[in-house]
Amino acid sequence: MGVTIDDARAIERELPRSYEALVRDAVRFRVGQIVWASFNRDETIMGFAFPKEERDALVAAEPDKFIMPKASELRFRWVYVRLAAIDPDELRELLIEAWRMVVPKKVAAAYEG
């Protein structure tokens, strides 16, 4: 089990309007100016767009896998995951759902269609 940033990059490249950016030595996936996924500098933790109202339940259900954002980030729709704790299918699901939160509905529908 476990995935890498390169696994994430392979998925990100498939997603319309998405691109990779380097910000302060850390990789970010964006649509326009919106960051929908990011990696810490050592590429072991990935932050990703996630509904705020579901975040507490996600972290409580699997605290060894998911991490709450810092207090200063709680206002954002965001949560973190340890890459070593997920498999490629989970990574794909998390990334696609995060991307869907930031692209127009018609773009997501066309990708899925």
Image (spheres, rainbow, N blue to C red):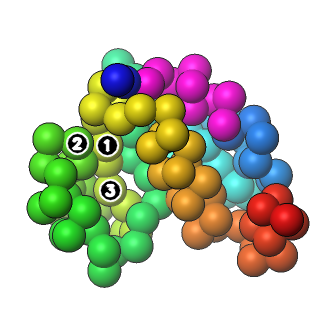
Do we see residue 34 in this rendering?
no
Distance of label 3 from label 1 (alpha carbons) = 7 Å
What type of secondary structure mainly makes up the magenta span?
helix
Residue 51, picture quadrant? bottom left
In magenta, the rendered stretch is 3-11
Q: Which amino acid is tagged 3?
A: Val
Q: Do the residues labelled 3 and 1 touch (CB within 8 Å)?
A: yes
Q: Residue under circle 3?
A: 79
Q: Is mark 1 on a helix, strand or loop?
A: strand
Q: What numbered label is drawn on residue 81? A: 1
As displayed, is residue 20 above or below residue 113?
Answer: above
**Which is more toward the observer, 109 or 6?**
109
Residue 21 in picture, x, y percent from top left: 64, 35
Q: Residues within 10 Å of mark 3 (few under 14, many from 20)?
A: many
Disc 2 vs disc 3: which is toward the camera? 2
- 15 left or right of 26 in image: right
Total numbered labels placed on residues in the image: 3
